[in-house]
Amino acid sequence: MKQSLKILFATPEAVPFAKTGGLADVAGALPKYLQPLGCELILVMPYYRMVKQSGFPIQYLGEGLEIPLGDEILRADLYLGELKQGIPVYFIGRDEFFDREYLYSTPRGDYFDNAERFIFFTRAVLHLARHLNFSPDVIHHHEWQTGLIPAYLKSIYVNEPLFEHTATVFTIHNIAYQGLFKKEKLALTGLPVEMYNPEGIEFWERINLMKAGIVYADAINTVSQKYSEEIQTPEYGYGLEGILRKRKEDLYGILNGVDYQDWDPARDPHLIARYDLKDLSGKRECKKDLLKEYGLPPSLEGVPLFGMISRLADQKGFDLLAEIIDQLFSLDIGFVLLGTGEQKYHDLFGQIARKYPQKAGIRITYDDRLAHKIEAGADLFLMPSKYEPCGLNQIYSLKYGTIPIVRATGGLDDTITDYDPLTGIGNGFKFSRYDSREFLNQIKRAIDFYAQPDHWMKLIRNAMSSDFSWQRSAEAYLQLYRKALEKKKGGHPFGN
């Protein structure tokens, strides 16, 4: 008999409603796999313009919450949607904060009022639980945008009966984005000034919302085992490695799963033809369709087609790609890209599209339908990341028989095994040093194997046979929730 756990999932984004990266995939999928394990869940996220435009049925609840923000009391409007399996998703609405084209930043930089926006959201999460009389066993909260939740539960809400037994689990998806703000913003939080110190939420005379989650949550995890180790080092910790090492007993790595209900070429509704390991002919049709989608010539059907779907940022290794771009396009290849991000990369790929119109297809946008078509139609997938907490696209690529070329970091290292032609073991290509020549060498190596049908078929079989389903990850999260509850029993206000 499984004991039911009540879980409140607080996230700044979730598919299918709003997405900028892998966090949204996790937040939209993990609850669906926890529910059959005996969890009762509600999801809470902001009511962005992207949510309004998502086309999914969302109901205005006709009631509001009064949320303190500094000296002000602001109204939060409530909306309700649902994930598959009837899991309720509550949206916190306030148009001046969330009715914007982007979620956190424009291509020119972060929104100036992100502190106000997400302090408001965080307080609203707790007030919503109160409004619904939902007493969670665990609040599972994600990224800096929700980092203040355990700080609140250990200070101003410490005597709230609703949260008396509530444990917190904080998931770090990317430690480089920390929610750093001027110390004057502390007044907006309503937190006791005693929490503003180097052992608390102070970070070089600023407040750090990511640090609040790390310091005060009962358990912390990252989205791969390798990344949980990497972030305890100066190279990857972005200044928080010391506090992470201090809390290493409560720090876990759980590899993200993927939702094979949504990412499976045998039943993907976005594809012109479906396919599986028994019959790969549909993959050829998908490649033709992808070339047509990008207006690229049919002559590219016979050469390796490289795909990228990414946030366009230094973290993703685009500086390496920029260094080898002319050498790459001197090879007999095709290339398609989908993504948005930093203006310098918008400009770079605009130039590439103009310089190599017969080889390069570029779309500077987010388009879920096209993402599926790239995963199915490309032959190889590039992820030369400087660091990668987990990465999902390399796992999607495996399922679609699209062979990843990755840098050995974080979840990329945990999921991709470099191909060994002698043993036939391996599901992709991997390089270690953050170096453009190493990256180009792996690309050339992959092209060599692409020209050898026996090796290429072996790679595709290995890739498509890899299993990274959410089932295993969900069970690991359930164990983590129980550890957090144990920890909570021994905890006390103002820290662990």
Image: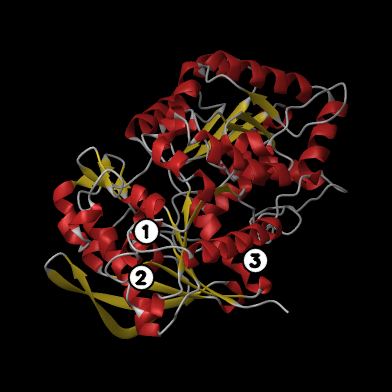
Given contact means CB atoms under 8 Å apart, are the residues at marks 2 and 1 in contact? yes
How far from the left and from the top, in percent, is residue 192?
Answer: 21, 60
- Disc assigned to residue 146: 1
Residue 139 visible, this orientation? no
Instruction: Count how many numbered circles sit on residues in the image.
Output: 3
How far from the left and from the top, in percent, is residue 278?
Answer: 88, 48
Residue under numbered circle 3: 33
Q: Three-letter amino acid code at disc 2?
A: Val
* Dot 1: element: helix
Given contact means CB atoms under 8 Å apart, are the residues at marks 2 and 3 in contact? no
- Decide which of tag 2 and tag 1 comes sooner along the chain: 2
Which residue appears at 57% of the width and 31% of the height? Answer: 409
How far from the left and from the top, in percent, is residue 440?
Answer: 60, 17
- Decide which of tag 2 and tag 3 comes sooner along the chain: 3
The quadrant of the picture occupied by the C terminus is: bottom left
Give 28 or 7, whichever is nearer the viewer: 7
* Dot 2: element: helix
Which residue appears at 40% of the width and 41% of the height? Answer: 243
How far from the left and from the top, in percent, is residue 452?
Answer: 83, 23
Give 428 or 451, whichever is nearer the viewer: 428
Q: Residues within 10 Å of mark 3 (few under 14, many from 20)?
A: some
The quadrant of the picture occupied by the N terminus is: bottom right
Query: Where is 128 relative to 21, above or below?
Result: below
Residue 200 visible, this orientation? yes
